Image: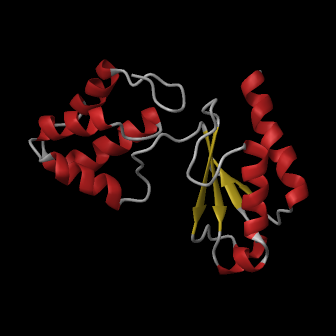
Amino acid sequence: MQNGSGNMVNENTMKEIISRYPAEKRFSLAIMQDIQRKFNYIPREAMEAISEYLSIPLSKIYGMATFYKALSLNPKGKYVIKVCDGTACHIRSSMVIISELEKLLGIKVGEITPDGLFSIETVNCLGACALAPVMVINGEYYGKLTAQNIAGIIESYKEVKVQ
């Protein structure tokens, strides 16, 4: 099965990740984090396999996957763009940054580009209020953003893919 970012959800890889852990309930979150790192989200097949391996009802696995903000049931792009919309960023026009990203990438917040390269999320705070407005792409911070410098940042990530 193929996920939204073009990666194959390989059943053997999934089972290999799960089997690294003892079949104990206390490892459920760690397993889901490893699955998330590998596939950029937690596929339904993975939740079913974790449920079976740990003898935990699927509803409990689903509950955990939806409770933790770091986990996602939807595919994410290779480059996850997180735009801060906390108070300082909002006052300094974070919505303009979000609009510019949506226009440049042709997607809305919560979506993934057809090529699987980018997805956009908003977050309540990135802890860099002095740099507002701020966005983070896979751990790389960009502050004091304007609509004019968004295109150059996005292009730098597209160029990495070409090389």
Colour scheme of this structure image?
Answer: secondary structure
Report whether 52 appears left or right of 96: left
Residue drawn at x 18%, y 51% is 59
The location of residue 155, given as percent across then percent down, is: 82, 38
Residue drawn at x 57%, y 46% is 111
Q: Quadrant of residue 130?
A: bottom right
- In terms of depth relative to the viewer, which is nearer, 117 or 24? 117
Report whether 97 appears left or right of 76: right
Q: Is residue 29 visible?
A: yes
Residue positioned most to the left: 55
Q: Is residue 133 visible?
A: no
The location of residue 66, given as percent across then percent down, is: 34, 56
The location of residue 133, given as percent across then percent down, is: 76, 68
Q: Quadrant of residue 21?
A: top left
Residue drawn at x 72%, y 74% is 89
Residue drawn at x 51%, y 33% is 4
Report whether 143 appears left or right of 87: right
- In terms of depth relative to the viewer, which is nearer, 19 or 43? 43
Quadrant for the C terminus in the image: top right
The correct choice, above or below, for 160 with respect to 154 in the image is: above
The correct choice, above or below, for 20 with respect to 120 in the image is: above
The location of residue 118, given as percent across then percent down, is: 64, 40
